Image: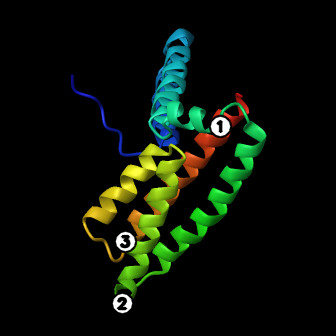
Amino acid sequence: MDTLNFDCAPSHVLTTVQGIARMGEDQNCCTAALTDLNSLAYIVSNLLMADILDHSQFDSLVCGDAETFTLIVDDYELNATTLIKAVADATADSGTQVKDALHQLKGSSGMLGMSALYERCAELESIGAVTLSDEQVKALEQLFVQSVAAARDALSKI
């Protein structure tokens, strides 16, 4: 079975679907259609967020102790921010800095069940990236923010 691959943030999908809903509203479409589109935007956003975090792995790590695991996510967030900054600041002359930072980010993200970020770091690592374009860094930062948000959301439900 084919799957859809959205190479964008759930918030962009949500904004797009809401924009479509507003277009329909401008053309005097019925309120029910607008409500259906907003519901669809919410569902799509949640489905895309599900791919960001491996919930079964994350839940098995947390073991019901949200308070302690919140501290672990806080520590991860601080360290990962430093690693992403190192990737962003790297030049062609400091290629090992990028490789090391991506490897560390991949490992810590994978350990916490942040599967999408883990996979992206693995892809960049496998191609031997020594520098990243501004767009690649922004995409990595965005995926990082989404991963931390998904982890915090999962913790809030424990």
Mark pair 2, 1: CA separation: 40 Å
Element assignment for label 1: helix
Residue 133 is tagged as 3
Residue in front for this viewpoint, 45 or 77? 77
Residue picked out by circle 1? 62
User: Mark 3 and mark 1 in contact (Cβ < 8 Å)?
Assistant: no
Q: Are marks 2 and 1 in contact (CB under 8 Å)?
A: no
Give whichever of discs 2 and 3 has the lower sequence position. 2
Q: Position of residue 26 (x, y in %)?
A: 51, 26
Name the spot of residue 13 as percent of width and height, x first: 45, 36
For the point 49% across and 13% down, the residue is 33
Q: Which mark is residue 45?
A: none
Residue at the image point whose x is 38% and y is 73% from the top:
99
Q: Amino acid at mark 2?
A: Asp
Q: In front of the other: label 2 or label 3?
A: 2
The amino acid type of the residue labelled 1 equals Val
Residue hosting label 2: 93
